[in-house]
Image (cartoon, coloured by chain):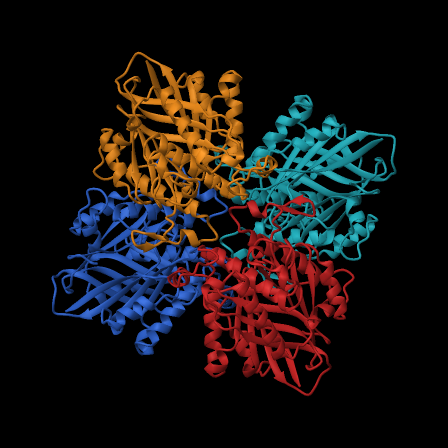
Chain colours: A red, B cyan, C orange, D blue
Amino acid sequence: MPMALVHRLSARAPDDVAPINAAIGSGDIDPNGIVAILGKTEGNGCVNDFTRAFAVRALGDAIATHVPKTRADRIALVMSGGTEGGLAPHWLVLERRDSERGPSPALAIGTAHTPSMPPEHLGRHPQAALVAEGVRAAMADAGLRDAADVHFVQVKCPLLTAERIAEAEAGGATTATRDTLKSMALSRGASALGVALALGEIAPNELNDAAIGKDFSLWSGRASTSAGVELTNHEIVVLGMSRGWSGRLAIDHAVMADGIDVDPVRSALGRLGVTAAGQLDPAARRRVVAVLAKAEAGSTGKLRGYRHTMLDDSDISATRHARAFVGGALAGLIGHAEIFVSGGAEHQGPDGGGPVAVIASREEFR
Amino acid sequence: MPMALVHRLSARAPDDVAPINAAIGSGDIDPNGIVAILGKTEGNGCVNDFTRAFAVRALGDAIATHVPKTRADRIALVMSGGTEGGLAPHWLVLERRDSERGPSPALAIGTAHTPSMPPEHLGRHPQAALVAEGVRAAMADAGLRDAADVHFVQVKCPLLTAERIAEAEAGGATTATRDTLKSMALSRGASALGVALALGEIAPNELNDAAIGKDFSLWSGRASTSAGVELTNHEIVVLGMSRGWSGRLAIDHAVMADGIDVDPVRSALGRLGVTAAGQLDPAARRRVVAVLAKAEAGSTGKLRGYRHTMLDDSDISATRHARAFVGGALAGLIGHAEIFVSGGAEHQGPDGGGPVAVIASREEFR
Amino acid sequence: MPMALVHRLSARAPDDVAPINAAIGSGDIDPNGIVAILGKTEGNGCVNDFTRAFAVRALGDAIATHVPKTRADRIALVMSGGTEGGLAPHWLVLERRDSERGPSPALAIGTAHTPSMPPEHLGRHPQAALVAEGVRAAMADAGLRDAADVHFVQVKCPLLTAERIAEAEAGGATTATRDTLKSMALSRGASALGVALALGEIAPNELNDAAIGKDFSLWSGRASTSAGVELTNHEIVVLGMSRGWSGRLAIDHAVMADGIDVDPVRSALGRLGVTAAGQLDPAARRRVVAVLAKAEAGSTGKLRGYRHTMLDDSDISATRHARAFVGGALAGLIGHAEIFVSGGAEHQGPDGGGPVAVIASREEFR
Amino acid sequence: MPMALVHRLSARAPDDVAPINAAIGSGDIDPNGIVAILGKTEGNGCVNDFTRAFAVRALGDAIATHVPKTRADRIALVMSGGTEGGLAPHWLVLERRDSERGPSPALAIGTAHTPSMPPEHLGRHPQAALVAEGVRAAMADAGLRDAADVHFVQVKCPLLTAERIAEAEAGGATTATRDTLKSMALSRGASALGVALALGEIAPNELNDAAIGKDFSLWSGRASTSAGVELTNHEIVVLGMSRGWSGRLAIDHAVMADGIDVDPVRSALGRLGVTAAGQLDPAARRRVVAVLAKAEAGSTGKLRGYRHTMLDDSDISATRHARAFVGGALAGLIGHAEIFVSGGAEHQGPDGGGPVAVIASREEFR
């Protein structure tokens, strides 16, 4: 019976893979079981954030010393830049292990890689359909049959470059945009809607090209998507609860309606058996293994009826404001700020809000 | 019997005094009773933040149309730049009115202006002593005899300029620093320790020049200080609870041990009769008139044992990170982000934390 | 015979109008002759730059003490935020005076205000046509008949706000964009193309809606446009050389092909009789009264074949990079950095370059 | 007879070592001759600039595939972050080759590594003395006997970390500062003064601990120093002109008195036989192989008598402003912006100015 483990390890720098190596050295992590590594790195999280690539390089080199290349190539490396406010840089190592022990249902992990996608599909209905298919494959990989058992879907999706646009145009096609930065948002958005399709959060007939990146009333409450230049397909990691898995870990999720809507997260903690009258006390805190959230500045320019200035600040990107602020709101509940808050939440939760996944242990974690 | 009123008004820009004029027009505010106006403006809150001066100019012009100059000159205008994250720009108009009605004890307001201070006293023991004397005068003005009844002391203090340093040196004196930016921190710190002296939070023999700006184990849990170039003395506003005042408003305070330590604020709300199992519900929220907090990045580089990166970020000032983050933590409790979070918390609360004052109404506010 | 004067005055802050008041007090400036004041203020030059509005307020108050309101209302106040690198904040006060003295031809100044423009015309052909008409009116005001005599046209143009978009839509019209920030670029671009039409730099049949904001092969080498929220019409200032004017000032212009193309400016200086083998020597420098330039990051991401990173920097706006850099290039020629470099050069000069106007005195200036 | 080569190669990202590998592959670079690689990377050049470490990692990996480790360890890798304005990210590969051909005197390269330095020496006289000794060793390595033949000295120096401060204190010593950021400036300053000592630019009796980091009237016109966490000794590269070397390359230097003082650089170009009436024309430009300059914001807050705002900008570090601005001034002369402008110029050139080295080819370079 498979068992999922999640290792949260503090990082002292974007290339600080020492804690991962140490955990492998001590036997806490079996490198052959690593399915994905999520990293929160301390760049600006925007276009010129090289901490993500630096981290990927360091992780790749470290993994290569432990596992054969064919296996290493299947590990999803998902870096999210930006540790604004008190957010702490850290790694989340997702591991799958065979086990006899432990209660069930438990946290289940499945992965899938979609085929390569032609550039002209990006940000359009075919991308959403492709991702939806990939999510179903990852669910099957995890043995998750019911969409209701899925609590978090991480998608790493491609973006457009000048070369890829030229390739499409050489073939007589046109891409959804010729703006490479905008292609990241479109790819994230279409991928999130693909998750929503797969999970039944939206109906197939609700989705069309015009809605992608525009109609933010369509969203997934469980998708977290990020675009990267290094791939032309999609890497998908699905986390859910399954009777086919055992172990001490469980997952649940919440949807924040806006950046300070922490009570749904408190409820999710309650469903996981972690109670919090106010902030989590130290014992409860140790049971919370990982918190993953998406943050964004609401496009209305208002939060609970009061004006926010994030979208008008030409000195600090709105995504940086949002991560710091939502990080504070969540840390005020969780009791620390080593939480995975990422930006760019197109079609991921409602406008100004976002999905949050919580992974908790049935016993104390640390 | 005097009555204190606090009007919280949203601002659409640093010079948007329209809501104040409207409240005067409708009779909600009696301009002759205005004691102080605190403003949260949307600049960077650092050296080149001109939104503060812009706001002061707009406020000054507006006040001049309503009250005679001698009275206008006595109104303390305290601007705090920086509405990072979801923080909402707003005004807090503090008014004193004669009244027969209302329960007691109630919110009391007192003010004092210290004499002008020679530049060489700045950041040293004599400044703290001068401020302590001023706090006592403001307490007397409010009829507050017991330091335990004081919950918030706002001090606007001077800073050093090249001219003032030269003036001191021409007289054979030396100033505590020749760095004008550093003089702001020293002035804030010495002023906060002056508050601590007046309120008995530290003993006179604990204070010496070497401790100011260095020994952050000395602090006030009720001081909020800000330095400005436009004065050479100190403007002091004391808020407390007094049996000599009546009205629907009450104040209490809390000390956050770090930037996410919201439970003491929750307790203060409870003492004010505003209960919050999770986030304040809309009815409770309407009873909270104002929240004033200080925020800073802890100097250890850690928050609850995890690394934060605020002090190492050369793109965004640590004070901006801290306001966004602490703003998120408090907004996650209060239920909105029109709260007065200011930076620069030297000797105001413990390292990385800060004082928070809450003013609540016995009935719903809005 | 009219005479044009240009007063360049250093500013110590965005609201530092003291030098203007002093020049009026000493008789150097006749306030009734002021036609326009251009200000370089020390904000970020982007959306949340309040130094411009702060300066306008201070200038307006100062002017009101010297001239009647009807006259004051006709003075164009054009603020450009952003003094990156070594650029020095300063005012340029443009004055028109009656005079018998002085050589001719000389610097001529003309102004015009267009009628108010319906929001749906912004960023489209009708705006360009309206501005072209206004430029012709300002030329007539200056007595400039030949477009070849025009060297600089400053246009202050409107932008779209949510209210104006709603107004257009209420009337059944659609605006060129619903993005208020983008409307600034479109308005600047259409206004610049209006200048190009009036000066014969482009032919009427070259211009259509689709080209505005897209086809940057169309541009004016003499336009400088900026958008502001405070007007719904256009304020136009034309500077040229006229036999109908006398005085010691002359103007010429150059077009930089990119941000470091200073030799055309050197040639313009030569045509004005100010020679520069290397950098201007102090005597030559004193003859240069004002330099006005537009700066932008080239959209190709390259400068002379080498990659620049301005467009990819999510920490600093490309406009701030460009002003600092072009400011350095021009200051390296001129010999100081109190020069008026502004950003946002859509259709103003070629992609990555921009127009530069130089006003020089026949004798030494300072 | 040795020959020095300098290869300037454009980089598409901080880890883009492809051009170096390509040059090795084509035989343009002999990897066994590489003495140093200087890299201009596109980070913020301040504390949290990880592009430098990312570049070092990529370079190290690349070198390891070409040369044995003992040789690779002797290659100095000096990264300078910050390509503000139009500055282009690039590598400068310094190579030493045996050769019979070419004219003489020619560019000579020498290197030296000092012994490890105890932390308590940092920023004090012993560090300067140690560096001076190292410079003499590097001169000897290059066969440069006369200090007048030295035109550029690059020093990579250590900084203090919490651990190193503790180590010093455990041994009963105190360090010059306990502020790790400040230690970088002190180390750069002491190292520059060490260069000045070795080159006879200051007399030994002029130097004492109190002057380091304070008395900026003491400076070297040929030093360029940068501090890094990865070493506890000093890596020194000396460039000069020697009759013992042959080749087509020559070097000269200039000292800019401030950020726009380009005429001394023009003179240096002239001495190298590259003439420039205005900006270098394309043929002259191809003969300029490399330009290395230091930039900083003058501490007086003025440039040529006009106020600059670099030191008061809390949104953009003064070092970033200075690089963009000085980059523009130099590019306006050189004709492109692939030039090596680095910040942090303590005791390197006069206050607000800095040394510039120019390496030119006797024939056209590209």
x and y percentages locating residue C278 in the rendered image: 23, 40
Task: Work out whether B240 lies above or below C90.
Answer: below
x and y percentages locating residue C44 in the rendered image: 48, 42
Relative to the observer, which residue lies in front, B235 or B58? B58
Q: Which image quadrant: the C terminus of chain C?
A: top left
x and y percentages locating residue C318 in the rendered image: 43, 48
Q: Residue at x 73, y 61 (%)?
A: A264
Q: Residue at x 52, y 73 (%)?
A: A114
Task: Work out whether B145 lies above or below D211.
Answer: above
Q: Residue at x 24, y 63 (%)?
A: D6
Task: Work out whether A193 lies above or below A135.
Answer: above
Q: Residue at x 32, y 77 (%)?
A: D70
Q: Which image quadrant: the N terminus of chain C?
A: top left
Residue C23 in view of the camera? no
The residue at the far bottom in this view is A100
Relative to the observer, which residue lies in front, D183 or A277? A277
Relative to the observer, which residue lies in front, D233 or D265? D265
Residue B300 is drawn in which quadrant? bottom right
Residue C154 is drawn in which quadrant? top left
x and y percentages locating residue B51 in the rendered image: 56, 37
Relative to the observer, which residue lies in front, D87 or C303? C303
Residue C250 in view of the camera? yes
The residue at the far top in this view is C100
The number of numbered badges drawn on the structure is: 0
